Amino acid sequence: MAISLAMLLGVQSLHLSKAGLAETTWHHDINWVAVTELEDPQRFLNGGELVLTTGMRLRSAPDQRRFVRQVQRAGAVGIGFGTGLTHEDVPPALIAEANRWGLPVVRVPYETPFIAIGKLVADAQSADHVAKLERLIAGHQILARALLTGGGLTQLLKHLGGMLRTDVALTQFTALLHNSATELPSARTWASYPIPTGRRDACTLWVRLPFEDSGIIGYAQNLISVELNNMVKQRQAHRALCGQVLEDVIHGALETSEAQRRLAGVGVNSTRRNVVLLAVSAAHHKALVNTSVPQVLENAVAAVVGQDLAVVVHDDGGAAPALARQLSSHLAEAGIHATIGIGGAYTKPNGLRWSYFEARDAASHGLPVNEPERLSLTSLLLASEDVPLADMANESLSPLRAFDAAHGSELMTTLESYLNHNGSVAAVAESLTLHRNTVRYRLGQITELTGYDPALTADRVQLWLALAVARLGARRG
């Protein structure tokens, strides 16, 4: 350990002694030894030194007093005065001024070379540095062992808190991954350390004040970063696997028994009521499928379905809306703008499929959190990827779009209004400020161009589906 003035005086081989009778501070550690014969050594001192001098240029009492003041201002811990050369003993004026400022003075006899004092202090500093390094390396080994032997982040942070003798916490966006205290960390009473995970400030290590850091926190930051990135890779692989199973269920590609077996393999118990929470983000879909979820959803099954994140949760008591809001807040905190669709709560694989379609339909409404509506057969048909609805819709509507573009007409607008007003010519005329005969004329043009008569139920359904598919495609695009 570092050596203090009191400890230095206790080294019998140096034959050092206190000069003067005043009580001074002797317990300060000596950072270094500075040997000088300058009248003003102040600008060559950094503080914490034991200044050794023989007083070669300190002939007069004013010079001696001035030297003490300059050394004291520089923050030195004391003066070691060599006797038997220029001065037979420590000058009284120097002792008096040192006593005035509370600066210790050590008498160094002629037979004790300054280099012996310097070597002793240097050896103490070196031993102290080696001891700190040994403790730091031991701490590194303890943290690495805690992480690599299956304890994970929890054990690593537990050992880190023990080394720092304080509480530690780990947060990732809104999720609290670990906290050894009963209170939540705050910038007022905790120190924060960002953990590099590829996203700025994605994860933060919190340490409750006060504590003394020997360098172990920097190593802990690196270990936590490595573990979190490993967790991201594991999460990606698991979500991809769950996504494959969920897509097979959604597409109806599995028999019921096989679907139940495969769902159970990824953690979904299809005999219970399950709800699908579907997060959709056109702008941030890459970040969305890889990001963490709130701690309340850690036990849920998350899957990547296309470019969306589907979270399957057990819900026997209507907790899905609250979970969806927490998921929305968590994603927003991560800088991901997403809409959350909530499906209904159903049992069995087909129920999970239906919940997905409801969640998908709800997410298209565009609010941050969208609760489910009763899903119609038409909505289910629009959600199917096995029916070429886009091609069929384009085939039905492209003649109208081309005619409108060529003649500046409004056949598409008239058709939409006619369908929205349940086939009422009068309502369309009023809505579009047209004569009823004009509306009838346009409807005739629509029939002639498309081959579908809006007045006939079957043809009206065909045209309504085409418009619905076009609107859905526009939202997705």
Image: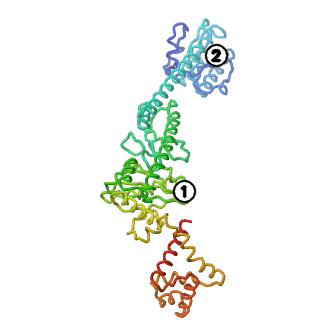
The dot on residue 476 is none
Res. 356 in view: yes
Front position in the image: 283 or 155: 283
The location of residue 41, given as percent across then percent down, is 66, 23
The location of residue 161, given as percent across then percent down, is 42, 34
Q: Residue furthest left?
A: 317
Q: Residue furthest top?
A: 111
Q: Amino acid at mark 2?
A: Thr
- Pointer 1: residues within 10 angstroms few (<14), some, or many (20+)? some
Front position in the image: 376 or 421: 376
Q: Is 269 left or right of 41, judged from the image as shown?
A: left
Q: Is 437 left or right of 408, judged from the image as shown?
A: left
The answer for how far apart the CA atoms under marks 2 and 1 are is: 70 Å
Q: Is 251 left or right of 445, judged from the image as shown?
A: left
Front position in the image: 403 or 196: 403
The location of residue 466, given as percent across then percent down, is 52, 75
Q: Tell me if residue 409 comes above or below residue 11 in the rendering.
A: below
Foreground mark, 2 or 1, reads 1
- Badge 1 is on which residue? 284
Q: Tell me if residue 347 comes above or below residue 447 in the rendering.
A: above
Q: Residue at x 64, y 22 (%)?
A: 67
- Pointer 2: residues within 10 angstroms few (<14), some, or many (20+)? many
- Badge 2 is on which residue? 53
Q: How is the image coloured?
A: rainbow
The location of residue 145, given as percent across then percent down, is 45, 29
Q: Residue at x 46, y 62 (%)?
A: 368
Res. 28 in view: no
Front position in the image: 285 or 133: 285
Q: Amino acid at mark 1?
A: His
Q: Disc 2 or 1, which lies upstream in sequence? A: 2
Q: Residue at x 41, y 70 (%)?
A: 377
